[in-house]
Image (tube, helix red, strand yellow):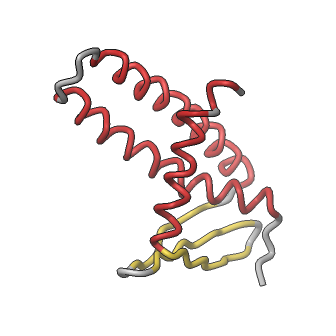
Amino acid sequence: MSKLSEDERNIFENAIYLPMVLTILDRDLKVAQTAPFKLKQVYLNLIEHTMKQVQKDMRENNTKMYKNKWKLLKGESDEAFTEYNFYINGYHEVHRYFNHNLRNNTEKLLNYYFLHRHSD
């Protein structure tokens, strides 16, 4: 059983998902730069603005982890699962995530940034 509170788990999961969102946005930015959009700059601005928000949230999340001396390390992965090692308050926990869930949750977070984050 996990010793993590829900808030602690959210911080660790942000450390997993936010870099994934940033990677996706970076790839999408490169595609958008070469895509034949009629008003290309609008899409580039949206992606760049979202990237800045994700980077800001990542920085805040990493600061929380650093101050608490928490550490996240990616472990082994296969076709179905990816393992993450959580180091918190002298404890080590291994968490396994189904890769399909990682993808779906990353997509949900990306939707949040595009559709809701700007209104917060």
Q: Place residue 36 in its image quadrant.
A: top left
The residue drawn where x is 71% and y is 57% is: 10
The x and y percentages for residue 29 are 30, 32
The residue drawn where x is 27% and y is 19% is: 40
Viewer-nearest residue: 91 or 38: 38
Apparent side of residue 119 relative to residue 25 in the rendered image (left or right): right
Q: Which residue is the extreme one toward the bottom?
A: 1
Q: Which residue is the extreme one toward the front?
A: 38
Viewer-nearest residue: 18 or 59: 18
Q: Is residue 96 above or below residue 11?
A: below
The x and y percentages for residue 3 are 80, 75
The residue drawn where x is 45% and y is 52% is: 20
The x and y percentages for residue 82 are 46, 75
The x and y percentages for residue 33 are 22, 26
Q: Place residue 117 in its image quadrant.
A: top right
Viewer-nearest residue: 66 or 18: 18
Q: Is residue 23 above or below residue 91?
A: above
Q: Quadrant of the N terminus?
A: bottom right
State how many labels appear: 0
Viewer-nearest residue: 46 or 88: 46
The residue drawn where x is 57% and y is 47% is: 109
Apparent side of residue 32 relative to residue 75 in the rendered image (left or right): left
Q: Quadrant of the C terminus?
A: top right
